[in-house]
Amino acid sequence: MVTTPRLRLEPLLPDHADAMFEGLRDPRLYAFTPDEPPVSRAALRARYERLATRRSPDGSQQWLNWTVADRRDGAYLGYLQATIREDGGAAVAYVLFHDAWGEGYAREALRAVLDELAERYGCRDADASVEPDNARSIAVLEALGFVADGRDEDGLRYRKALGRRT
């Protein structure tokens, strides 16, 4: 588990499916991503079972996924993902429920994950892909010291060297 002053990041488990389902049904979360809301609690649980293995099917990547919960009341606010590649870099992504937008939770949670990736997993850098129109996510990444580094199949690519706090 990773904690911040306001948040608790719990390793994602199949049992989180029930608590996360309704928040993930909000279509506003998918405005800048090709993903779609989960079709059922059972489908979400099956997805979480695959992710809880913490490894890609071919074993080449480590999959780290955390739920984001408010430490004060335990309410779930979204999730973060990190894929650690064989080259020592990590790709990061996050989704926060609409009610959590604009509160600084994304920056706080992502900062904690970046620290965890550097300190516990030895990652040297992190990257994230974001749609060019997703101004909120671009602002989060830039506030954490990510810099634009071209494009990839998912949009703009941002990178950050790890080991330095911002």
Image: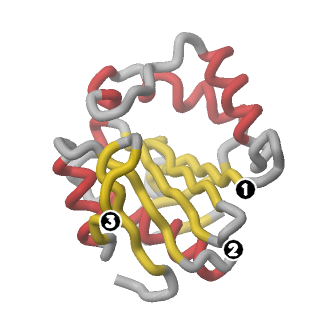
Q: Quadrant of the image for the C terminus?
A: bottom left
Which disc number belongs to residue 121? 2
Crowd band around label 3 with a 10 angstrom C-alpha radius: few (<14), some (14–19), many (20+): some
- Indicate which disc, 2 or 1, sits on the residue closer to the N terminus: 1
Kindly identify the residue that appears in the image at 38 percent across and 41 percent down.
154
Secondary element under disc 3, as helix, strand or loop, is: strand
Amino acid type, callout 3: Asp
Q: CA distance from mark 2 to mark 1?
A: 10 Å
Q: CA distance from mark 3 to mark 1?
A: 23 Å
Of marks 3 and 2, the one in the foreground? 3
Q: Are marks 2 and 1 in contact (CB under 8 Å)?
A: yes
Q: Is residue 137 left or right of residue 135?
A: right
Residue position marked by numbered label 3 in the rendering: 149
Q: Relative to 11, is 16 above or below? A: above
Residue 147 at x, y = what percent? 29, 71
Q: Is residue 113 left or right of residue 10?
A: left
Q: CA distance from mark 3 to mark 2?
A: 23 Å
Residue position marked by numbered label 1 in the rendering: 62
Name the image quarter holding residue 25.
Answer: top left
